Amino acid sequence: MTQHFRDDGTAARGLNQKEAQPDAGRSVHAMFREAPTAIAVFRGPDWVIDFTNRLAQRLFRDRTVVGRRLFQCAPELAGSRLADLLERAYSSSQPAAACELLVLLDRGSGDGALAEGYFNVTLQPIPTAASGAESVVLFAVEVTDQVLARRRIEQLAEQLEHERHKLEQIIQQMPHAVYIAEAPSGQLVMGNAQGAEQLGRPFVASADIAEYNAGYHGFHQDGRPYAPHEWPLARAVSTGELVRAEPVEILRTDGTRAIIEYSAAPIRDASGQIVAGVVVGVDATERIRALREEQRRSEQLKGLAEASLAVNSAPSLERMLAEIVQRARSLIGAHQSVISMTDDQNWAQAISAASLSDKYAAYRAYDAKSDGSGIYTLVCETNRPLRMTQAELEAHPAWRGFSGEGARHPPMRGWLAAPLIGRDGRNLGLIQLSEKEEGEFTGDDESILVQLAQLASVAIENARLREEALAAEKRFRSMVEATTVVVWRTDPRGHVVEDSPSWRGFTGQSYEEWAGYGWLDAVHPDDRERASAAWRGAVASTSRYEVEYRLRRRDGSWAHTVARGVPLVADDGSIYEWVGCNVDVSDIRRAEEAFRVQHRLVRTIAENATLGLLMMDERQRCTFMNPAAEKITGFTFDEIKALDRPLHDIIHHARPDGSPYPMEECPIDRALPRKSQEQGEDVFIRKDGSFYHVAFTASPILDGDVPVGTVIELRDITEQKRADAERERLIAALERSNKELDQFAYVASHDLKAPLRGIANLTQWIEEDLAGTIGGDAREHMTLLRGRVRRMEALIDGILDYSRAGRVRHAVEPVDVGQILADVVELIAPPPEASVEVAPGLPVLRTERVPLQQVFMNLIGNALKHARRADARVRVGHHDAGLHHEFFVEDNGPGIAPEFHERVWGLFQTLEARDKVEGTGIGLSVVKKIVESRGGRIWIDSVRGQGATFRFTWQKRDPSDS
């Protein structure tokens, strides 16, 4: 069933009212009216409009009216492709369709122009009950915007392809390498032939930034490899960085290296979004290498200038040599540098310095001396530089290897040497380099080293002058730093017209107060007129201004200042300003006054000293002489000064035997060059030609480290020498006398003991012959007689020991006091009921063993003998007494009353009768003499009834022990 609807919704002609279903019709009608597709029903063959929905009405600009013909409402469609499709669908009763059908429609622009429209059209014939179609339904979807957009896209794509082709052509024609990458991935999409030529390989596309290092190998200037994200193009596409001429060292596929300067930039769309990146690479290998070479040469020349300053400012020859080798190595770029100095080819006395890079740090302690047998002597003999590769060096006939030092000497690779030549053409040594950091040594390197060697030669010869200059500079700097400087400026008329912070800070005057001639208000009233006159006179005469006056400080105190000023003259000769300064010399003036006082004091002391005092300058001329020195030498100071000769040539030029005394052998004249004090005794010559003995001390006077003179102290020891000679004569005579006394004592002892032994033997024989008849009294008398004989023998031995005590010396050796006491106790063999206690920790001395043993044996023996009790106890100990050890021997005997403490040391003195206690009275005298002759002392601590303690000191080290 086919239905047709008018605009008002009433049924059209041909509608079967019986079959109509109003409700369903209304629903379908509403659905078609609001459908999202343009729908229209045309009844053929005249294409009467039976139905149009809202979209169809808008399509035809509301010109379609149900019941009217289509071409009446839209005449522009007549003969169109749409009309053909309508006819075909209607005539064939088959659907017809077209995509993107072009339809020219009147869109109501007002000018009658037809607008293009594109539609996807479907025509569906509506058959009637009889054969054939009565109506055709039009379904149309306008795709005009889509078609136009697609065509625009196709057009843009075509344009883009065209532009891409043009870009490729442009890139290929560019003289430098060009690469383009997409953003944000960094995918390389384009590269030209110049890039391939630069890198020595064809263009390698990379999918992203991470793959950059797979095809390309670049290095920073410090040698670090480029990470993928560090490449200039990667930074441009990822961060938008603009990179300008960044040098990258590229490793080519053939192993060579090129330096490419890359400039990279991001490519942005209209919104500013990064869509791609481009990088341009310029091969700067030759330019940069040439520039680096030029920079290297410039740095070498600059280094030479710096080396000149450094070498000429070195504080010593050793430091200068170290500076030279360090500079040589850094200037040329070598791993090894050494300098050797020689004096007339005396290589054994060579002074050397070396500088080795970290590569050879293990060899920095190598210090073998040159022996003059290597190839380096060729440089010194010819005074010409030599430059060789390692192969040339080893093939040279003068090559001697390392002269047996191969295991210790650092290895070499190539060699460059330049001689050190003095002003007179004499060779001073040479500088050697080995193993250049890059490549072989070049002619430029040789030229630089020769220049450095020339510089070093001059510097070495001028070392003393430089040291003197440095000393002078140090003195000047100290003087400047010790002063306060005030700087000022005036106009040509001498008026202050500009503020001076230093003047303001020093005086406290404001600018308004000191402007013009107001500065005179800060000058001391007593100096003001003189200062003003000097300044006005200098301004009037346009001459240099210098005057000293007192200037008021900010705190009100007065400072001694020296004012100096000079005019500044223009090209036309006119003065355009004055500049000057005030230097605070208060400390200098105080120091000068203190020096004058000190000088007067020193001169007074020197003139009144009993020692002779002389001073010499660096030329050995006498510059001072006190009265004592004049008296000793017989010369006055004026007489010696008038001679204008070295002091040695006046008072010390000959020996007593008449032979000359060269100055270079004189210890007094050696004090100055050696910078050391010299002492001794010598023989001088008086003005009258007589010789006299002196004791002297010569001390150098140093200004910093520079010797400027010598102070000499003299003492006439002629009489002392005579006294010494007389003393030696008397000592010799005394020694002869002592020897004779020893011989006499020995003979006397022998002669005296002989009859005593005869008496003793006789009494024993008598006693034996009368053994059966001799009575008790007679036997007792015989025993008493033999006891007197033994006492007489002991007395003779004691006298002999006493005569020798203190005179006889024994060898000095290490002496263990504890062991000595053990030996003494064993020799004495005390009774079983008696005891001798020796304290532990007794010292070991370097002394004479026998005298010390004799002292201990006598004291311990006396303690046991005089104890008067069977349970005698003796204790021996010591304590430290500084330079001495103090020993004591303590007993539990009856003690000694204080009034006898001195008596016991006398000869033949005993406190008890000899018949009660056997003794000679000499033992303690011998002990006292032994102790005192060894620099010690001995005394007693005791009271009667409380035992006695004998104490004595003994030197820790014998004075005769060297």
Image (spheres, rainbow, N blue to C red):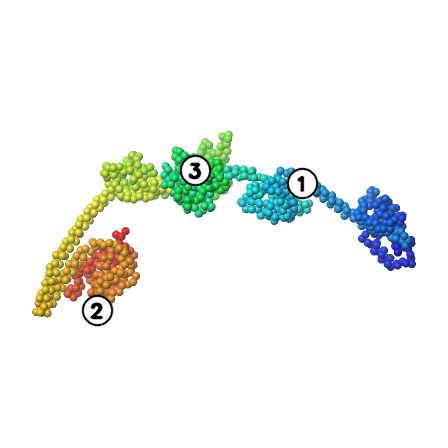
Q: Element under label 3?
A: loop
Residue 572 higher or lower than 217, as above or below: above
Q: Position of residue 673 (x, y in %)?
A: 34, 40
Which percent across, then down, holds residue 900? 20, 62
> Which numbered disc flags the more N-terminal residue, 2 or 1?
1
227 left or right of 542?
right
Q: For mark 1, what is the residue?
A: 167
Q: Which mark is residue 870?
A: 2
Q: CA distance from mark 2 to mark 3?
A: 101 Å
Q: Residues within 10 Å of mark 3 (few under 14, many from 20)?
A: few
Please identify the quarter of the rendering in which residue 286 is found. top right
Whether residue 523 can be seen here: no
The percent coordinates of residue 424 (x first, y second) are: 39, 33
For image coordinates 19% across by 48% down, the residue present is 732
Which amino acid, mark 3? His
Q: Helix, strand, or loop for circle 1?
A: helix
**Front position in the image: 464 or 152:** 152
In the foreground, 725 or 320: 320
Task: Give the quadrant of the N terminus.
Answer: bottom right
Q: Nearer the viewer, mark 2 or mark 1?
A: 1
Between marks 3 and 1 in the image, the one whose residue lies nearer the viewer: 3
Which numbered disc, 2 or 3, marks the residue that appears first in the sequence?
Answer: 3
Q: CA distance from mark 2 to mark 1?
A: 135 Å
Q: Which mark is residue 396?
A: 3
